[in-house]
Image (tube, grey):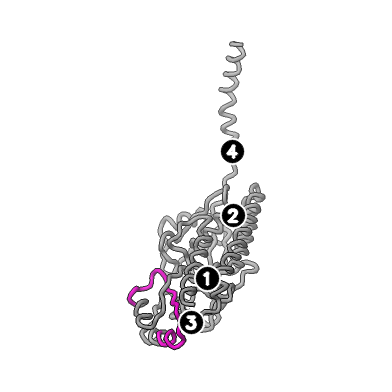
Amino acid sequence: MSRFRRLLGRWACLLAPLLVLGTVEGKASSPSVVASIKPIHSLAAGVMAGIGVPILIVEGDALPYDYALRPADNRVLDEADVIIWVGSVLERFMVRRLVPLSRRVTVMSVLEQRNVQVLRFHGGGRALGEADPHAWLDIGNAKHVVDALVAALSREDPANRRRYAANGATMIDRLNRLDDRIRASLGAVRHLPYVVYHDAFRYFERRYDLAPVGALTQSAVQPPDEIRLLEMRDTIFTLDIRCVFVEPRLDDAMAQGLVDGIGARLAVLDPFGTAVPPGPDHYFVMMERIAAAMSGCLRRAG
């Protein structure tokens, strides 16, 4: 028995390096995926669950409107296999950077994916016919992005295509259930009028047949002037609008001045979910918070 154990020990010593080498060489590394903003990063993280983790460019409470690429961002873009962004209308800071990369990297624009429905502006501070970039706020579009990610990652990493497909199916199921919850929560208030600060919610409003009266501005980087503020204040008073939805970055004094003395409530909507941690759950938490803020304010108003 002791001789057998000695022989077994020798064989184990000889085989161990080979087993370790085989494990390392046989391990398929996941593609390097870079996403521009949190909602899109979240969809990618869900599709990649258990395989890899996508890299996020615009982190924390930063917004893409005024973002500038850092050296670290340039490094991850150089090393990427797949880059997903919304498009040049939103992430202008990435346009020049992606031109040379697109020759060797899979670059996916949300607005250009098959079956994604794109709304367009009709003037009013935006170029006529310019695409509204906030397409992720329509859950139908989010599902098409998931399908596109599954297809792209399966091409990049065929060894894991079944896992991508299974993760994609799980994400679609979660999105369908989220869609049902939001529709139910907004059903009783969808006829009630309201005003938004920034015209960023048209996809959400269309999907749930809501009743927006207008927006103070169509551009997140161009605050409304005094004349526009007075016009909207008059509209809020005349139409007895009880909810004005603002965004996290809006100046508190401006927002309060808009509703003081006319009985309207203020509530916050965040189309990027800047306060929500990144990851596969981010998209779902962000959308639930938007729906909760809308339904909460409008129910009290109704």
Q: Residue 196: horizontal and vertical position, in percent?
A: 46, 77
Look at discs 2 and 3 and give the one toward the viewer: 3
- Foreground mark, 3 or 1, reads 3
In percent of width and height, residue 138 lies at 57, 69
Residue 47: image tag: 2
Q: Amino acid at mark 1?
A: His
Q: CA distance from mark 2 to mark 1?
A: 21 Å
Spatial distance from mark 3 to mark 4, Cα to Cα?
58 Å
Q: Residues within 10 Å of mark 2 (few under 14, many from 20)?
A: many
Is 235 covered by the magenta stretch?
yes
Name the residue beneath numbered marker 1: 134
Residue placed at 60% from the left, 69% from the top?
A: 112
Q: In the rendering, at what x and y percent does residue 192 appear?
A: 52, 79
Residue 130 appears in view: yes
Which kind of residue does numbered mark 4 sit on? Glu
Q: Say which element carries label 1.
A: loop
Q: Nearer the viewer, mark 3 or mark 4?
A: 3
Q: Estimate the spatial distance between the alpha carbons at disc 2 and disc 3, rounded to whole Å.
A: 36 Å
> Distance of mark 4 from mark 1, alpha carbons?
42 Å
Mark 4 or mark 1: which comes first in sequence? 4
Which SS class for mark 4? helix
Above or below: residue 252 compared with residue 97: below
Inter-mark Cα distance, 2 to 4: 24 Å
Which residue is disc 4 drawn over? Answer: 25
Position of residue 173 measured from the top left corner of the image (x, y, whole percent): 63, 58
**Which numbered disc, 2 or 3, marks the residue that appears first in the sequence?**
2
Q: Which residue is mark 3?
A: 214
Which label's residue is closer to the chain start, 2 or 1? 2
Decide whether residue 8 is among the magenta residues: no
Compare marks 3 and 1 and give the one earlier in the sequence.
Answer: 1
